[in-house]
Amino acid sequence: MTTMKKDFACTWKHKNLFKEVDYKDSFISLVFNGSGINLMLKEKSKSFSDDIKELGSKKVKFYTCSNSIIKFGIDTSDLFSECETVKAGVLKLIELQSDKGCAYIKP
């Protein structure tokens, strides 16, 4: 569990960002791929459930990689409802950077 909290700190940093930046005029996208996909499993991340719902209501987008879901044998019904599954996490990162002008920040 300690590792999960450390890895998931990225979300809480973004949550703190909304204290400084008006979320109505901005957006944050979090892409979960590879073993990071496990952070979006409801059963493994119960303690983050309320935070994920709150961030989702503030235009934070949670993207999960279909390739990782398949690789780890995850049933999409086990993911938080705020997750949007994309074909490839790396492709979503490229799209966000090239089409939306996003910056890639890795914790």
Image (tube, grey):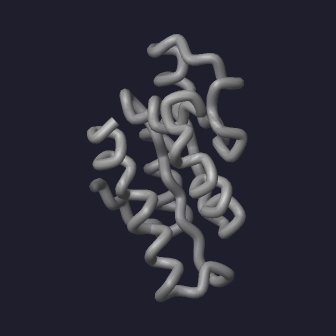
The quadrant the N terminus occupies is: top left
Q: Count the marks.
A: 0
Q: In the picture shown, does residue 64 fall above or below 52?
A: above
Q: In the image, residue 82 lies at what x, y percent?
A: 68, 46
Q: In the image, residue 8 lies at what x, y percent?
A: 39, 49
> Which quadrant of the figure has residue 56?
bottom right
Viewer-side residue, 41 vs 100:
41
Q: In the image, residue 27 lies at what x, y percent?
A: 58, 70
> Which quadrant of the figure has residue 33?
top left
Decide if residue 106 is on the left or right side of residue 46: left
Q: Residue at x 32, y 46 (%)?
A: 7
Viewer-side residue, 8 vs 103:
8
Q: In the picture shown, does residue 45 fall above or below 95?
A: above
Q: Can residue 89 be seen at all in this image of the molecule?
A: yes
Q: In the picture shown, does residue 99 fall above or below 88?
A: below
Q: Residue at x 28, y 55 (%)?
A: 107
Q: In the image, residue 29 lies at what x, y percent?
A: 53, 58
Q: Can residue 87 be seen at all in this image of the molecule?
A: no
Q: Residue at x 66, y 66 (%)?
A: 59
Q: Residue at x 51, y 57 (%)?
A: 96
Decide if residue 79 is on the left or right side of residue 12: right
Viewer-side residue, 16 vs 92:
16
